[in-house]
Image (spheres, rainbow, N blue to C red):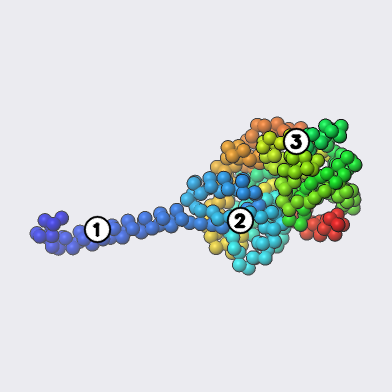
Amino acid sequence: MVEAIATEPGRVVRRIATALGMAVAGISAVLSAAQAQTQTLNAYSIWPENWARPMLQEFEAASGIKVNFLRFSSGEALARVMAEKNNPRVDVLFGGPVETFAAGVKEGVFEPYKPPAFAELPERFREANGHWVAIADDPLVFMTNAKFLKENGLKAPASWEDLLNPAYRNMLQMADARTSGTAVTRIFSVMEVNGRDEEKGFAYLKKLRQNVQLYTKSGGGGTLPVGLGQAAGGIFFIVDALDTKAKGYDVEISFPREGIGTAAEGIALLKGAKNAEAGRKLIDWATSPAMQSLYAKHKINFVPAHPKVETEASLAGILKQAKIFPIDDAYAQDNRKKFVARWIAEVLP
């Protein structure tokens, strides 16, 4: 190159310009790659941190997009996205039962988006216009302390009426409908088994109240007390109940013969999201087999929403004999606010 400078100055200028152009292009490519690697998005997660974190870390590894998230119960997350509607602080609402997302649709907080997997999902796992899409399914169950059952000569509850047994007086724990989507799913389950007769449904909930020692802030808040024997039992999502059992607590999981609800777990893009492109990439990934096939790896007992991902064998075996019905998102959208208000006024006191 020095030799070329000495003998052919015209060609040297062209070579320098070419070299500079290549250098600039190289720097631009490096910067673009760095920007892609440091691209971020913000989310509210309704899933507890011990489930959300491994899933979102898997997404970061797959995409190079960093996810900052805060965990809130369903009611808290919904209240936040509603309050922040005109200036959203996050891009995605991640996880949580369908009734929460149905309420969000009614409040106009979500931006429609149909990921590539949209058409492959069963209808109940997707809002028609793409305001939310399901990433899992999560049935409710009864969970009871085995020692309590033995000491009181009881079998695991197999009917909604069994939970009204005086033996459970002031011994049940379950979630608070003011903050928890688990609780709202419980209310809708009671309505369904009572033929959507609100008077019958709330009459049952008032009777059940006599046996409840504590309504917890989060859906899984009562699982540890039940496991420890501080409470006799409660109504929880199966993912929480099986997590309790996996930790070594002696609990029984059962289902009511009348049936019990299962809630699709959703994901949605916030309207006005500042990192919408990254948010869409997370939704693409979360609704695909790429994420849902990881539930078994991380021992998270969700039922996959994507039909190409099989339910983990032991979970499928537990659910095989259960009578389970889906929570109707349209019914939830129309009645959630009313039912929660009535529960607060008539059941909670």
Mark 3 or mark 2, earlier in chain: 2
**Could you tell me which secondary element the residue under label 2 belongs to?**
strand
Disc 1 marks a residue whose amino acid type is: Ala
Mark 3 or mark 1, earlier in chain: 1
Give coordinates of residue 326: x percent, y percent: 75, 45
**Disc 2 and disc 1 in contact, CB within 8 angstroms:** no
22 and 227: which is toward the camera: 227
The mark found on residue 71 in the picture is none
Q: Nearer the viewer, mark 2 or mark 1?
A: 2
Give coordinates of residue 295: x percent, y percent: 60, 40
Does the image show residue 244? Answer: yes
User: Which residue is located at x 13 percent, y 62 percent?
Assistant: 9
**Could you tell me which secondary element the residue under label 3 belongs to?**
strand
* Disc 3 from disc 1: Cα separation: 71 Å
The mark found on residue 70 in the picture is 2
Residues packed near mark 1 inside 10 Å, few (<14), some (14 to 19) or many (20 plus): few
Q: Which residue, given by chain and number where applicable, does mark 1 sit on?
A: 19
Residues packed near mark 3 inside 10 Å, few (<14), some (14 to 19) or many (20 plus): many
Give coordinates of residue 316: x percent, y percent: 69, 33
Quarter of image, res 67: bottom right
Give coordinates of residue 113: x percent, y percent: 60, 55
**Disc 3 and disc 1 in contact, CB within 8 angstroms:** no
Does the image show residue 338? Answer: no
Disc 2 marks a residue whose amino acid type is: Leu
Disc 3 marks a residue whose amino acid type is: Val
The mark found on residue 251 in the picture is 3
Q: Quadrant of the C terminus?
A: bottom right
Q: Nearer the viewer, mark 3 or mark 1?
A: 3
User: Which residue is located at x 9 percent, y 59 percent?
Assistant: 7
